[in-house]
């Protein structure tokens, strides 16, 4: 699964798969109905990949997560982030 994820984001990012697993484990314990926890998660992921996240995109991602409307398809998520 993560190999496909890395292919989608590009090979020029330096992410340790163990860090992804750690982040996923932490996220599974978070209250994803809490805007501040979701904000910390979104910022954590952006920081992990070392890519800037425009405030508008951050708010859009937070809104999607809070509403439960997170795209199930990586392609749809990538289109949203462009």
Image (cartoon, rainbow, N blue to C red):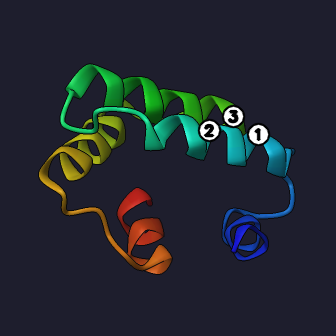
Q: Examine the rendered structure and indicate whether residue 69 appears above or below residue 38.
A: below
Whether the residues at callouts 3 and 2 have beta carbons within 8 Å, the answer is: yes
Q: Determine which quarter of the picture holds residue 73.
A: bottom left
- On residue 48, the disc is 3
Give the secondary structure at mark 1: helix
Labels 3, 2: front one: 2
Q: Nearer the viewer, residue 49 or 31?
A: 31
Answer yes or no: is residue 13 visible: no
Whether the residues at callouts 3 and 1 have beta carbons within 8 Å, the answer is: yes
**Residue at mark 1 to residue at mark 2: CA–CA distance:** 6 Å
**Earlier sequence position, callout 3 versus callout 2:** 2
Within 10 Å of disc 1 (Cα), the crowding (few <14, some 14-19, many 20+) is: few
Whether the residues at callouts 1 and 2 have beta carbons within 8 Å, the answer is: yes
Q: Nearer the viewer, residue 13 or 44?
A: 44
Task: Name the residue carrying label 1.
Answer: 19
Q: Examine the rendered structure and indicate whether residue 73 appears above or below residue 61.
A: below
Residue at (58, 42) in percent of width and height: 25
**Earlier sequence position, callout 3 versus callout 1:** 1
Q: Determine which quarter of the picture holds residue 82.
A: bottom left
* Tag count: 3
The location of residue 64, given as percent across then percent down, is: 22, 52
- On residue 23, the disc is 2
Answer yes or no: is residue 49 visible: yes
Residue at (56, 28) in percent of width and height: 44
Residue that extends furthest to the front in the rendered view of this protein: 29
Within 10 Å of disc 2 (Cα), the crowding (few <14, some 14-19, many 20+) is: some
């Amino acid at each position: 699964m993560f190999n496909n994820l890395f292919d989608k984001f590009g090979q020029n990012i330096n992410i340790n798969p163990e860090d992804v697993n750690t982040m996923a484990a932490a996220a599974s314990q978070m209250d994803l109905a809490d805007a501040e926890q979701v904000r910390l998660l979104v910022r954590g992921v952006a920081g992990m990949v070392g890519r800037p996240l425009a405030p508008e995109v951050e708010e859009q991602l937070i809104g999607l997560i809070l509403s439960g409307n997170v795209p199930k398809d990586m392609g749809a998520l990538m289109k949203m982030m462009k």
